[in-house]
Image (cartoon, grey):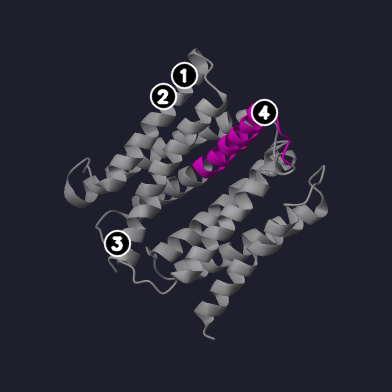
Amino acid sequence: MNTTAIMTVSAFLALIPATAYVLRPRQSRDLGFWAVALVALVGPLGWSLMLLAGEWHTGFSATLWLIISSCMLLFILTSALTSHGWRLAPLLLPYLLLLGGLAAVWGQAPERPLVGTAPDLWLGLHISFSLISYSLLTLAAVSGLAVFLHERALKRKIRPAFNSLLPSVMDSETLELRLLGAAEAVLGLGILSGMETLYFETGQIIVFDHKTLFSLLAFGIIAVLLVLRTRTGVRGRQAARFVLLAYLLLTLGYTGVKFVTDVLVG
């Protein structure tokens, strides 16, 4: 087994203990939680840093490993800085494990080289803003999904055991709003840095390709939701649908395009 295969399998296996651990009921962030969370971060992050050594990889698999690493890092920070953020783990970790599986399966898919004349600083800022905004929106979408599951259970007058692992409706909505605000701010910086990068390369400010259109639509939907939350108090499943829609659009623009170009088209 070559080094690439070993590191890919290791990064994927690092996510399994955390996924299994957080699906058991517990009342606090114990030592075991932090231990498995750090393992789930170190595995994908170590592999991502190895992929980035020497050159920037733009392939579908490398992008997924970067997303997993960024999401885990921001999740750990959220868990440390908030009292209920750690309870998003039963939804987040299985999703990241799924992404890890996809990254492992398509690890050998061809990738398009990174080309352009923009300064490395601007390009690095644009990539960083894009990755952070997508990861923040991922956590916001998970918070919205928790709200959706709670309200659906209330409507059906049932109490699924799984829901007891998640933050309450109020806590989930608070996390959702804070994460959305942060995602909107960083996404705005990502769009502006992307325009500046494009200007360096082509002399144009904006080109309406798939990635740009999906990013702008996601930015607009989040902005509308934040305004509605302030002025009309829209919340619950209705707000969660807005968040999930914005996440779907950004996913189509960020990873969907790479999947088509690198995997389907090859």
Sequence-wise, the earlier of marks 4 and 2 is 4
| Amino acid residing under circle 3 | Thr
| Amino acid residing under circle 4 | Leu
Q: Is residue 147 left or right of residue 165?
A: left
Q: Which mark is residue 224?
A: 2
Q: Is residue 258 left or right of residue 116?
A: right
Sequence-wise, the earlier of marks 3 and 4 is 4
The quadrant of the rendering that contains the C terminus is: bottom left
Sequence-wise, the earlier of marks 2 and 3 is 2
Q: Position of residue 100 (x, y in %)?
A: 54, 63
Residue located beneath label 3 in the image: 261
Cα distance between the residues tagged 4 and 2: 27 Å
Which stretch is magenta? 137-160
Secondary structure type for disc 1: helix
Q: Position of residue 164 (x, y in %)?
A: 75, 39
Q: Position of residue 108 (x, y in %)?
A: 41, 74
| Amino acid residing under circle 2 | Val
Q: Which mark is residue 27?
A: none
Cα distance between the residues tagged 2 and 3: 31 Å
* Circle nearer the viewer, 4 or 2: 4
- Residue at left offset 48%, top offset 32%: 241
User: Dots 2 and 1: beta carbons under 8 Å?
Assistant: yes
Decide whether the magenta segment is chiefly helix, strand or loop: helix
**Above/below status of 156 relative to 62:** above
Is residue 186 something that shows in the picture? no
